[in-house]
Amino acid sequence: MAARLLIIGGAERHGASGTAILRRFVELAGGPAANIVVIATASGEPAILEAEYAGLFTRLGARQARGLRIATRTQANEPDVIRALAAATGVFFTGGDQTRITAVLGGTLTDSALQTLVRDGTVVLGGTSAGAAMMSGTMILGGVAPGITRDGVRTGPGLEFLPGVVIDMHFAERGRLNRLLSAVALYPHELGLGIDEDTAILAQGDRFEVLGSGTVTVVDAGAATDIRVPASGPIALAGARLHVLPAGSRFELSSRRPSIVDRAA
Amino acid sequence: MAARLLIIGGAERHGASGTAILRRFVELAGGPAANIVVIATASGEPAILEAEYAGLFTRLGARQARGLRIATRTQANEPDVIRALAAATGVFFTGGDQTRITAVLGGTLTDSALQTLVRDGTVVLGGTSAGAAMMSGTMILGGVAPGITRDGVRTGPGLEFLPGVVIDMHFAERGRLNRLLSAVALYPHELGLGIDEDTAILAQGDRFEVLGSGTVTVVDAGAATDIRVPASGPIALAGARLHVLPAGSRFELSSRRPSIVDRAA
């Protein structure tokens, strides 16, 4: 079974789709057989998010859901934590600050265990906002400049569950095209995925499918014929390709090609 | 001489480029021979903007610059107003509400006179923010939904000094990609131009050049292979083309092709 990643753009608990995305996560994790672990390492208030998501997943039909507190690298190397992950059918990362996830988990036994469990398809991995950003090969850390510049975005390696992409969240709601464009202009190997709130991609192998009420904006600078990144001042980018994908659309990562499904049909 | 249009994304009086864009306008209007008319019809406080821009243009080297108050359609048909326009070498529209410009000027003698004076190259036409939006064939009136939807943008005809384009202003600063994408997905004949603050395009005939400290984002849905606009819910758009053009870049409107100039060279 291929790796299954449910990567959510944030605000999925209160979105127009209700809790359809989280319900899908429970189904992927086995529905009535699901044993879901909630990791709120990104958050400064993990207890609140652990309780809220565990309650939600149980109401949505999971057999069992509970928080797994990993606040330090020591905890991330504890045998009890690894045992809890090994027993899970779904692991869900909440929002917060994505650099806390990579700083606390990066290279630990938790990291290694998750990589194996996800790759083998034993565990479906879900994450929202920061918990989604950390799944990408290249992770957006921040970006303040409104324009498209070298300094308009700061990036660092994510935990690479989905390599070859750079993911940005709350995409339409926070008007983040420019920092995603800055990232892909700097690193055109990476495919830029901007995921709206209450919207997700379900990645399985080489493909992903879009879920939820918003869209996923794909920025493909690999198609660009000319990219110039000056030391200061705005970036130039000619011929990038852009796709706007609502629910039901699919995308093949290796060929960088979308296929849109007509929901009216 | 072809029509010359200087279309500014707003905030050009206090931008990183100083007043370079407005200085360029004065030069295009004849420099020491320039006779510039400032029209603040878009604004609720025209006297303040008339005085400020007239003062600026004079300090930037114009022989003469003054406000021309056109607050009603009656005024827009007065012979004195037409005489003032006929004597001008440059006409500048301030920001405010673009629908005030089209409502007050549309179809009046002022409208006709400007079309002729601009087409003949007698007058260079400048405008910022609302004064820029009204120059396009299709004008964005507003848009509140963050997503890319049929309701995500409201459009109406502009005064069509530059047909075939839809212009959005304060583009990076206000994160307006989605409403521009909504507009071009609905009307792929129109080329989408998103102009940042303190940034402008100088359109002459079939080409434009980018000026200022930001970038112009060109969204070309004409290249799209698949566009679906449902009655409700998000638009799907596959294969649109996107260019990010900093100062010095040029663009050919008929072929929809950019050429980026290396400013380091």
Image: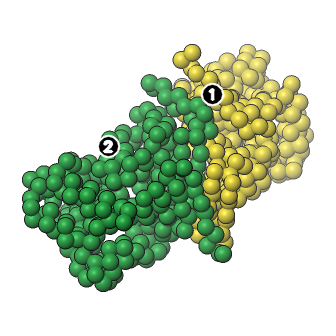
Chain colours: A yellow, B green
Q: Please, is residue A30 above or below residue B61 in the view?
A: above
Q: Chain of mark 2?
A: B
x then y, percent, for residue A106: 82, 51
Picture residue at 38% right of the left edge, 62% below the top: B2
Q: From the image, state whether disc 2 or disc 1 is nearer to you.
A: 2
**Dot 2: element:** strand
Q: Please, is residue B168 above or below residue A122 in the view?
A: below
Q: Relative to residue B254, is residue B263 drawn left or right? A: right
Q: Relative to the observer, which residue lies in front, B138 or A70?
A: B138
x then y, percent, for residue B76: 14, 56
Residue A67 seen in the current view? no
Residue A112 seen in the current view? yes
Disc 2: CA contacts within 10 A as few (<14), some (14-19) or many (>=20): some
Q: Quadrant of the C terminus of chain A?
A: top right
Q: Amino acid at mark 1?
A: Ile
Q: Please, is residue A264 above or below residue A90 in the view?
A: above
Picture residue at 50% right of the left edge, 69% below the top: B213
**Dot 1: element:** loop
Say which quarter of the image contains residue A46.
top right
Residue of label 2: B157
x then y, percent, for residue A220: 68, 46
Q: Which mark is residue A260?
A: 1
Q: Amino acid at mark 2?
A: Pro
- Distance, label 2 to label 1, CA atoms, is 31 Å
Disc 1: CA contacts within 10 A as few (<14), some (14-19) or many (>=20): many
Q: Chain of mark 1?
A: A
Picture residue at 41% right of the left edge, 34% below the top: B151
